[in-house]
Amino acid sequence: MFKLKLYHNGIVNSYGQIFFSNHQWFGYLLLLASFVDPYIGICGLIAAAVSVVFADWMGYNHESIRSGLYSYNSILVGFTIGVFYQFNFAFFGLLILGSFFTMLISVWLAAFFSSYRIPFLSLPFLLGVWAVMMGARGFNAVELSERGIFTINELYSFWGPEMGKLMADIHAIKFPLLIDVYLKSLGAIFFQYNLLVGLIIALGLLIYSRIAFSLSILGFLTGYYFCDFFQANMTELEYSYIGFNYILSSIALGGFFLIPSWRSYLMVMVSATMIALSISALGKLFFNFGLPIYSLPFSLVVMLLLYALLQRYNTNGLNLVQYQLYSPEKNLYAYHHRLERYKNDTYFHIHLPFYGEWFVSQGHEGKITHKEDWRFAFDFVVVDETQKTFKGSGEEVNDFYCYDLPVLSPAAGYVVTLVDGVEDNLIGDVNLGENWGNAIVIKHGDFLYSKITHIKDASFKVKLGDYVKKGEVLATCGNSGRSPEPHIHFQLQSTPFVGAKTLKYPIAYYVSKLNGKFTFHSFDYPLENQNVFRITPTNLISQAFYFVPGMTMEFKVENGAKKSLVKWEVFTDALNQSYIYCGASQSYAYFVNNDTLHYFTDFKGDKKSLLYYFYIAAHKILMGYFQDLEVKDILPVDGFFSGESQFIQDFIAPFKIYQKVNYSSTFKKIDDVMNPQYIKIISSAVAQTAGSVHGEMNFTLELSNNKISQLTINDGEKCISAKRII
């Protein structure tokens, strides 16, 4: 059963791969289109089956086989053999041999070009079909076919009068010349010079991807008018068989290998002119060998441009696809989602160097000492409800709330500088001779160091050269150096020296409080006179979202009168990415837990499954509890829009995206702040089109017994309840 499913998927996906797609329904449609001419269709199907079966028999990677990577070129070879040679016993031997040979070339070129990070495209087809054509010249048992001269008559004799009449009626339609040649060019990709195949492929292309469809037209028109301008000497038949070079290259460059944008559309137009030149040059060269160039211009130009783009120092907005989703729309929406979601993210996450709530007594560009080269620094103290920094008279260092409180490592790193032995000042005094007082500098990465100063004498818990973890206690707050009262001076810098210039670098995550309301900040800068909190995980939340490989979860789901059991399991893939897998829906939800946040990064599978609802409901959850605190995020637009609105957005998405999905999660209830046994989190996803609400989904997450105990979904039409049983 597994083998049959592997072979089935490999064969169907091979057809989609011709147009850079992994959508199976599109593969089925292309398979159907190939059977308009049944001889060509049968040959393509046999070629795909031979390649998939032999690839499995030889032990190649199942994922590559399933995707059709090793077999889509063989289909094109099968189409060619079906067009040029008569059916007989020798014919089928040549077909099987040519398919197997092309599959081996695909494996070889995949390995060869992977080191250059460029695809092999249709080179295996070209090498395979040239080998077949030249080899067949010496095989007397293989005879050339006269099929393809009277296409309608041939289809009439095979399919009967109904098909013959349909083909005649379609060809009798007086399409404008450009549309006629465009459709025939699409059909020519399947070696069938008729409008019906072109119409089927065009319809499938439009349904599969509006961007790919528009790109195919743009590339074709550019090539057509370029040839017309230079008065290229081509008959309509020649142009149609050459036209698919423009179509395939435009889809490849405009939306598959490059993120769709006005720049990628411009690149499509540039590539079309290069292909036109290549067609003229290569056509004359290969004519001397009696070989057709077929898709050679497409392969050479696309590979040349992709390799050239990989050598750049600056993308200038022409961005290569890093994570292939096999759809121009998905590539585009995912890119913009990541760009917006992580636009302020930093490689090293720096946290506040203390526990609990502190007050920013001086921030960036502070008027007292944070000036010029030292303007990007923070001074922190602890205040009471009246904004006083001390209790009692405030004449002794022990009167100050922050004095002797722990100072923490803002991130992992090595202690590279440590100054100790400077005594605390009397309140109001300053030590200008030892300006920074007791200090510690930690190296987090090349050219990124954190410095904490005015530390209490002899309070260090670490020594020079130690490796410290994020949140590890380093020392305690003191009043040494230029410090009239106890406080922490904190800054980032690019060198390890105590007196180094400051570096503007954001705090990864923290919470501020104003008038009793909490606000979550990510990769931001605390403001002067702001109360800020380092986020400390709440045990119930961190335990509930502690998903480790091998862990299983089962839910009893009630969707109206329908009841079911759903089981999930946690895995980690070869790239060390963690994900939750639902076997019943074959869905994957990838996530990250960095001890401060749990957040999902990607979803693949059924968007009506419970796992997808959980992916939305828990898209971004803070690990520390703050009453009524709202965490905001954005969601990918895929799955939230459909119909006419999505259809139009897809067409103009490379130039403007007006759809958006806003996410928020809010802490609403806790039974015991100190030792919680129950927490309720409310989350929502609001889809908007040009600012107007398109739809809304609301969720309730209930945590108890150190796990997610209940998930409730309400989208306005249905209410689904999932209770955790394991």
Image (cartoon, rainbow, N blue to C red):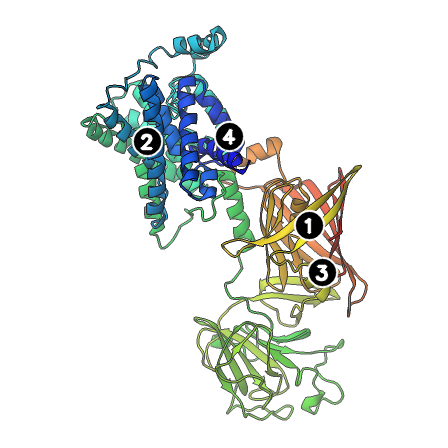
Residue identifier under label 1:
617
Q: Could one spot residue 273 in this view of the protein? A: no
The residue at 70%/89% (across/down) is 398
Residue identifier under label 2:
295
Q: CA distance from mark 3 to mark 4?
A: 45 Å
Q: Residues within 10 Å of mark 1 (few under 14, many from 20)?
A: many
Q: Amino acid at mark 1?
A: Ala
Near-viewer residue (504 or 368): 504
Of marks 3 and 1, the one in the foreground? 1
The spot of residue 31 in percent (x, y) is 47, 25
Residue identifier under label 3:
629
CB contact under 8 Å: marks 2 and 4: no
Q: CA distance from mark 2 to mark 4?
A: 21 Å
Q: Residue furthest top?
A: 161
Mark count: 4
Q: CA distance from mark 2 to mark 3?
A: 58 Å
Ranked by sequence position, the earlier of labels 2 and 1 is 2
Ranked by sequence position, the earlier of labels 2 and 3 is 2
The spot of residue 292 in percent (x, y) is 26, 26
Ranked by sequence position, the earlier of labels 3 and 4 is 4
Q: Residue furthest left?
A: 288
Q: CA distance from mark 2 to mark 1?
A: 47 Å
Ranked by sequence position, the earlier of labels 3 and 1 is 1
Q: Label 2, secondary structure: give it.
A: loop
CB contact under 8 Å: marks 3 and 1: no
Q: Could one spot residue 422 in this view of the protein? A: yes
Q: Residues within 10 Å of mark 3 (few under 14, many from 20)?
A: some
